[in-house]
Structures are given as structure tokens and as C-alpha cells.
Amino acid sequence: MANYDCDVALVDAALDVNAAENTSGAGAIVQFFGDVRPLENGEHIDGIEYEAHQEMAEYQLRKIADEAAERFGLLAVCLHHRVGFVGVGETSLFLKVAAAHRGAAFDASRWIVDELKKRVPIWKSSVVRSDQTREMAARL
């Protein structure tokens, strides 16, 4: 197992992207922000509702971070994902990776996000509140 700093979490409030500490000895730090887009499948949305199996999701996040640290020689991984409602323009995923060299940091970041999408039990559904509001107003 690689010796590295690891911080993984599911969070039900706005992500604190400054929480991840700087890592001494790192030649490269890559940050990724996954933000909620205003369009989902061509439809305007107000946000996304994320649900997760908390224990299993955190276990898988940690496992992915451990595998990435081993595979890419990482010095640190900070991986936080929101649960609950996340509005358009808000960050639902924050990833910070530190490595000795930029190639490893970039490759690890892409790999971590891809693995998260495949393996972590987090489900999302689009929320279109404005359409529901218009629909209700039309009925009155």
C-alpha cells in the first residue's frame, strides 16, 4: 500500500475546496471540479439530486484513491462528492491530486473520475423545479 495523504468523503453541503492541504514535495497538483450543467439530455434543469449508499460509497472512494496512489505514485488525494440537491453551477465533485510529476497527476485524475463513475454507488436524477412550478401555476 502506498504511503500518501488521503481525504475522501460524501458531503451534504457545499464543498470546501480549500480544505485540502498543500502537499510538500509535490511537483504537480491537479484539481478537478465537476459542476452541474444547466442542460441534461438537452433539457434545462435546476440541479441534480444525488443519492448514495453512504458506507459503500465511502469505501469505494477510499479504495479508488488507494489504487490510484499505488498505480500513479501519488503523494495525496482529496476526493469529495456531494449528496442531496446540487444546483446548476455548483460543484458536485472535487478532486485534488498531488504527485511528483505532472503526467502522473493528470493521468491519475482522469483515472479516478472514470473509476468513480463506474464503481461508486452514487445515483443522480435531474431536478426541473421551474417546470413543475409553471405546471402548478397553469392549473390554478
Image (cartoon, helix red, strand yellow):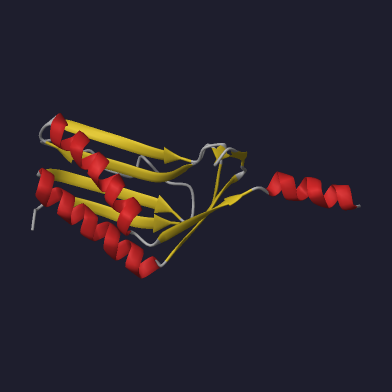
Q: What residue sits 20% from the left and 41% below the top?
A: 108
Up-down: is 97 above or below 118?
above
Name the residue at the right extreme. 140
- Picture coordinates of residue 49, whole percent (x, y): 54, 54
Q: Nearer the viewer, residue 107 or 54?
A: 107
The residue under the point 34% across, 59% down is: 120
Q: Locate residue 67, reporting x and y percent.
A: 16, 54
Q: Is residue 22 visible?
A: yes
Q: Quadrant of the N terminus?
A: bottom left
Q: Toward the viewer: 118 or 20?
A: 118
Residue at 9% x, 53% y is 3
Quadrant position of residue 44 = top right
Q: Is residue 2 left or right of residue 83?
A: left
Q: Residue furthest front?
A: 41
Does 108 sit left or right of 55 as displayed? left
* Residue 105, x across and y down, in percent: 18, 36
Residue 51's place in the image compared with 31, above or below, is: below
Q: Residue at x 43, y 46 (%)?
A: 15
Q: Does 127 sit left or right of 121 as displayed?
A: right
Q: Quadrant of residue 17?
A: top left
Q: Is residue 84 visible?
A: no
Number of numbered discs visible in the structure rendering: 0
Please state the horizontal and vertical placement of residue 117, each as a whole percent of the image.
35, 51
